[in-house]
Amino acid sequence: MREFSSPSPVGLDPRANIPGLLAQRLARDPDGVLIERSTGLGGTWAPVTVTAFAAEVRAVAKGLVARGLEPGDRVALMSRTRYEWTLLDFAIWAAGGVGVPVYETSSPEQVRWIAADTGARIALVETAAHASVVAQVRDDLPGLAHVLVIDEGAVDGLVAEGATVPDAEIERRSALAGADDLATVIYTSGTTGRPKGVELTHGNFVFHTLNGVDGLGEVCAQPHSRTLLFMPLAHVFARYIEVLCIPSGAVLGHTPDTRNLLPDLAAFQPTFVLAVPRVFEKVYNSAEQKAGGGTKLRLFRWAAKVAIAFSRAHDTPAGPSAALKAQHRLAGALVHTKLRAALGGRAEWAISGGAPLGERLGHFYRGIGVRVLEGYGLTETTAPTTVNRPGLTKVGSVGPAFPGTSVRVDDDGGIWISGPHVFRGYRHNTEATAEALVDGWFRTGDLGTLDDDGYLRITGRTKEIIVTAGGKNVAPAVLEDRLRGHPIVSQVVVVGDQRPFIGALVTLDAEMLPGWLSNHGMPPMDVVTAGSDPRVLEALDRAVDRANEAVSRAESIRKIRVLPTDLTEANGYLTPSLKVKRALVLKDFAADIDALYVDTREHHG
């Protein structure tokens, strides 16, 4: 067993709560800009000062009080990532309430379960369509008193209704919660079974964000720091950053539509970007596609290789050679500046979480001048629990323990976490809580290794380990991540439990396919046709060979099968945080998996 701890520079006041963070920021920096709101007019953003935001939070909180919200009552919040999400979140806390995020893509059954399990009194939803989802299950929710629609003036309505509530009542309620009191219940999207409600306290957020400001101050607490949130605020990662920006002083922006992401990044110009690896893959792949063919494509690929080599050289004692430095300067002038411009032009840092990024992309981004800090965390740990540091980044690792955190890897490779950011339990589920929390440690269910510097590497999930017929234990994540790096690959599910060898189900990316086909001199074709085209299959086989370089022969993918349909959130095969529901895929595509093993001649030797 190995264990590492990072000391906490922050002492936790038992009376600390999230409204207190905003009050301290207001006292310290009343005229500073807290948020910039998109005006919707040609990429312009309007500043919202700390004073203006705090006043709006108080006015909306008064409206919630007027609607009958009592301290401790739960409020469901179902919306895309937008300014009103953050405003309502802080207003719920100011009124003494507990916010319960609901993914805006949730089904009526999921909404019913979350609202019933938390006993939500009020639901704040973004659109009429969301309201109709709630309406389908409202008869099963006798405690739900109000459903208010943001797009139909819910915020202005609350402000008007709360006009007669005294400010002193909000001050009183804002001070009620202590560090041990419930701040939110976030339902894990769960790749299996019914979502579990993770209970996070005010202390979890306050302690963890103050430690974040201290440990990552170079990233998030500089006078020019700013970030654009586009991940769902129903996810713990974005929610943590929303709260972190209060004590750190960073300017926060929101954009709900990732289809408009590149223009929004160009207009907002964040200095640090938070995303899941899929976003970083997309930026790289679309840049490669934009290069087209011929000389331009060769130039792009050369510049990408130089970036990766330059970054890797920084991890050697000698560092980059004079020749490599010269190549890097030339690649920077010709290509890298354009790539940085795709992230807004001012991005110095990228924080990646949610899934492994892969060393190739980590080195690529660092090589073009955007330092990727890969981290690891769970809903149960209020987001980050390990993260690479600006002072020492090990590409391919998820970094050392976050300040105030202890990380332990047991003799079976299981990862355990301890610290004041660890959740207090699963709502109404003592059995699952007892299984997860043991003697002050949280059993993550993930597998990893710790190096001599305390840097963690994730090797897989306990539940996802594949055991082949030959008894070989295979963690699918490393193969899946590498193969997903190919421009036309959307999703990969590695299979082979109790089978003679490892295979993989692959889906194609409909967005990237047309450009890739034309760059390779192939006629246009749809995803289904492409999935059986010999030239496409040959390209995928080459990608499989590259992915296999990371593992032993016994663990390597020998055959793939291209599915005719992608795995998406819309068709139920991805969770809202874009993780594959492996058990469902294995069940629904059992015939495709069997087909991999009918003719057992292997494609890969």
Image: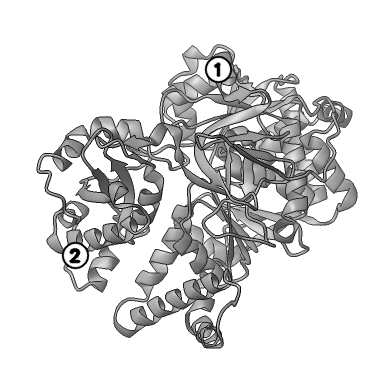
- Badge 2 marks a residue whose secondary structure is loop
In the shown orientation, is residue 525 left or right of residue 289? left
Separation (CA) of disc 2 from disc 1: 49 Å
Residue 397 position within the rendered picture, expressed as x and y whole percent measured from the top left: 55, 53
The percent position of residue 518, horizontal first and vertical second, equals: 24, 71
Quadrant of the drawing holding the C terminus: bottom left
**Residue positioned 83% across, 33% down in the render:** 16
Amino acid of disc 2? Pro
**Residue 269 location in percent, x, y?**
62, 66
> Front-most of 312 and 343?
312
Q: Residue at x 53, y 53 (%)?
A: 275
The residue at the far left in this view is: 599
Query: Residue 32 is drawn in which quadrant?
Result: bottom right
Q: Is residue 319 visible?
A: yes
Q: Residue at x 51, y 56 (%)?
A: 396
Looking at the picture, tell me which residue is in the foreground, 129 or 305. 305
Residue placed most toward the observer, 418 or 96: 418
Say whether disc 2 or disc 1 marks the residue closer to the N-terminus.
Answer: 1
In this rendering, the answer to whether 87 lies above or below 265 is: above
Near-viewer residue (499 or 38): 499
Quadrant position of the N terminus in the picture:
top right
Quadrant assignment, res 265: bottom right
Q: Which residue is mark 2?
A: 524
Q: Which residue is mark 1?
A: 117
Q: Is residue 572 visible?
A: no
